[in-house]
Amino acid sequence: MAVIHRTTMEPGKLELLSAWLPTRPWYTGSAAEPRLARVGGFRLDDPQGEVGIEFMVVTDTSGDVPVSYHVPLTYRAAPLDGADQALVGTSEHGVLGRRWVYDGAHDPVLVDQVLALLRGQAEPQAQSVSDTPDPTVTVRPADGLAAMASTAVQDAKHGTDVVLDEGAATLVVARVLEPGSPGDAEAPGQVTAVWRPADGDEVRGVFLTLG
């Protein structure tokens, strides 16, 4: 299981995201530099122990109404080939050295582990504690889900679609989180999780849907 190091990152995650978020088509704010707070999320383990995988929730309070965004991230010790467009930035980790931080929707390791989660072959982990499962993450498994590869990633105002096996299925990554949304009842697989927005009350919403 992944080890959570109690150390620093320079620049920090929120600093990287503050510059990156306004460049995304699903960003709903008007501020060039959003005011972000980390308000939730969870992790998955890379079986090879090479790539950090985090599903982070940040709330932007720069506008009239706070907005919570779901940002899957991967952390790598070297650049991911062919993924320059998905690079959020680089950061110096106090223990591990330089990390390349990517939008995880474009990272095949993250996609593989989400599919493993939907098959019941991976367990959500606590965001900030080593070797600790996160029981608040709820998975509606996809029966008979086979291994599939990401063949395209499409960012739009509604979120991000990860096209699998040339359109055999699509993994929909929710970006602007909607508290209390039941999601798509007809979808073969779905992941919901909790976060704590600006008012301090814990809420639940859909993070990932397999369609």
Image (cartoon, grey):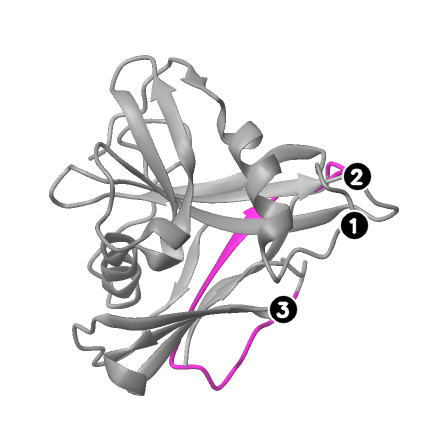
* Three-letter code for the amino acid on which mark 3 is drawn: Lys
Q: Which residue carries the number 2 mark?
A: 62
Q: Majority secondary structure of the magenta segment? A: loop
What is the distance, in whole Å, between disc 2 and disc 3 at their CAs? Answer: 19 Å
Q: Quadrant of the N terminus?
A: top left
Label 2 close to label 1 by CB (< 8 Å): yes
Q: Which residue carries the number 1 mark?
A: 30
Q: What residue range appears in magenta?
A: 181-200
Q: Which residue carries the number 3 mark?
A: 157
The residue lying at 27 percent from left, 84 percent from top is: 166
**How far across and how far down the image is residue 197, in percent?**
70, 42
Observer-nearest of 149 and 85? 85
* Three-letter code for the amino acid on which mark 2 is drawn: Ser
The residue lying at 60 percent from left, 55 percent from top is: 204
* Three-letter code for the amino acid on which mark 1 is drawn: Ser
Kindly tell me whether residue 52 is visible in this rendering: yes
Mark nearer the N terminus (2 vs 1): 1
The residue lying at 24 percent from left, 47 percent from top is: 80
